[in-house]
Image: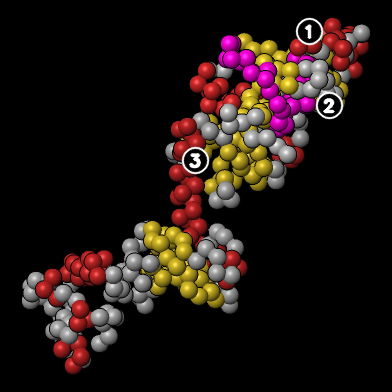
Amino acid sequence: MSNNIESVQDFDWDLFEDTGKYNTKVKLTAEDQRARVKVLCKEPYAQELYDKMKEFESRSGKSTHVNKDLIEGGVYEVTAKQISFQDRIIIAYDNLSGTQVEVPFKEFSRDVDSLARGEGLEFNVMITKGSGSNEFVGSERKCVSINNKSELDTHLENNTWFEVKVTKLIKGGYIAKYKDSIECFIPGSHAAANIIRDFNKLIGQTINVMVDNYDANNDLYILSYKKYIEHSMPQRISDLEFGREYTGNLTTNPYDFGIFVEFEDYFTGLIHATEFEDYNKIKKSYRTGDEIKFYIKNVTKKKQQYRIVLTLDPESIDSEKRQWSDLRDRTENKSFEYDVDSNSNSIKIHIDKESSYEVTLRRKDLERNLSMYPMVRVSKVDPINKNLKFEFVEKVD
């Protein structure tokens, strides 16, 4: 009998109580008898043996190579040792017990060739079934799915957005995949900023979404692009450029007061009827989906809701917003020298010979940075909220 223990003579056999419940029908080799090997006959005792072996392994640092039945549905960390492209399976071994696990290619979510290159040899599998030959089949893909479901639950709890790939059109909406493993549902009314005109256009696209709800009865996550727009707007609104000509499409037929326009598949703004010389003609000729060119006139905010006002005339753009937008073009991601006014705890950033930007700081922040950093670097300019973010930096040669 082979006992698979590297150093039998070093094992502390006094760890076990002699219950007398051993399988005496198995004939032991003379070597096994000298080593006091006994064959336990029932699973509870086998479990005790396994636990004691692992306790010895932990204390001594020596591997006992004990084979242990793996539980169906259990998750284990394994290391890939062989790849059979003919049989399309990966031969791996449980890192704790050394038990062999077969992982079919179809149950492996990553590129099998990466394993052949020696990359990512360790991974988790879920045992899906065992065979009479004491071999086990595992699924790495199921483990990934479990982890990804946990991530979706976290996204729902924290109201955070993420990417999915829209894979197909079904009745009522779309099927989208999260990390190529979890199928989710996006209702058609929540798949775009406004009414969808071409439903096939979204197929194959990767979009940002948020979890709107979880259908426990069908184990299905309901996603929403509109919810993403609502929550991300405070970050995205400052991307708008005052002075740039945009192109958008009418979201609906013209109303009496003006037309709503969607642009960049995200923003929606209003062009008021007074922007047109003959709005009655516009109402008769323009229809949903028609293209129109315009400028951002202004952006206002009321009760956490942003209102984007559009214009056909670049001369009517809000002058203050335009100045801030111009400041962003000239300063963002660039470094500048500055002067200090210690009396008012402020610095004046010299943008160019004609313009500067003044900001007041806390005295301790001013004192901490002055002696170390002779320049500032502008990291973000927000024309909507009219503020500038910067950091002190070392002089750039």
Q: Mark 2 points at which residue?
A: 247
Give SS at disc 2: strand
Q: Looking at the image, how many numbered discs can be counted on the residues?
A: 3
- Asked which quadrant contains residue 251, the reply is top right
Give SS at disc 3: helix
Q: Name the amino acid, label 2.
A: Thr
Q: Mark 1 points at which residue?
A: 257
Q: Of residues 299 and 248, which is closer to you in this image? A: 299
- Asked which quadrant contains residue 255, the reply is top right
User: Which tag, 2 or 1, sits closer to the chain's start?
Assistant: 2
User: Which tag, 1 or 3, sits closer to the chain's start?
Assistant: 3
Per the rendered image, the range of residues in magenta is 321-348
Q: In which quarter of the image is the C terminus?
A: top right
Q: Where is residue 236 in the image (x, y as percent from the top left)?
A: 66, 27
Seen at 49% across and 51% down, the residue is: 145
Residue 178 shown in magenta? no
Q: Mark 3 points at which residue?
A: 152
Q: In this view, does 143 lie above or below 132?
A: above
Spatial CA distance of label 2 from label 3 is 35 Å
User: Which tag, 2 or 3, sits closer to the chain's start?
Assistant: 3
Spatial CA distance of label 2 from label 1 is 21 Å
